[in-house]
Image (tube, helix red, strand yellow):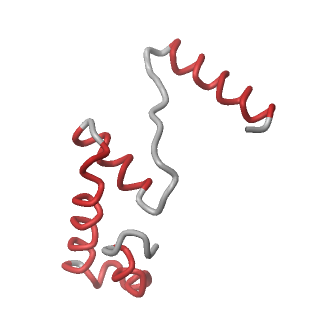
Amino acid sequence: MQKGLKKYFVNMDEYLSSLGLYRKMVARDASSLFRAVSEQLYYSQNYHQKIRQDCANFMRANRCDFEPVSSSLMALSEPGKS
């Protein structure tokens, strides 16, 4: 990790700690958004695939609201493809 970047994270961790918070690590992969949502809803990242599938199903059911991104819809439901 770059020296400046490391200092940034140390400062951020100190700031969060002063608020009684902490930074939660999430894997850097195509499911990181879904892991973060899973962590918030279930206090565990283990449900990221369920979150991902639920999002894809919701977008399919409401396709007209997501028309500009509908070409990405199929990729969303397949981890590793997005």
Q: What residue do we see at 24% from left, 67% from top?
A: 53
Q: With 74 as the anchor, is 23 left or right in this view?
A: right
Relative to 32, say whether 12 is above or below.
above
Camera-side residue: 32 or 62?
32
Relative to 2, say whether 79 is above or below.
below
Q: With 9 as the anchor, is 80 left or right in this view?
A: left
Q: Quadrant of residue 26?
A: top left
Q: What residue do we see at 28% from left, 39% from top?
A: 44
Q: What residue do we see at 34% from left, 83% from top?
A: 74
Relative to 13, say whether 37 is above or below.
below
Instruction: Kindly give the residue lying farthest to the top in the view shown.
Output: 18
Residue 33 image offset from top left, x and y in percent: 42, 54
Residue 29 image offset from top left, x and y in percent: 49, 58
Q: What residue do we see at 46% from left, 73% from top?
A: 82
Q: Where's the N terminus, which quadrant?
A: top right
Residue 12 image offset from top left, x and y in percent: 62, 25
Q: Quadrant of residue 78?
A: bottom left
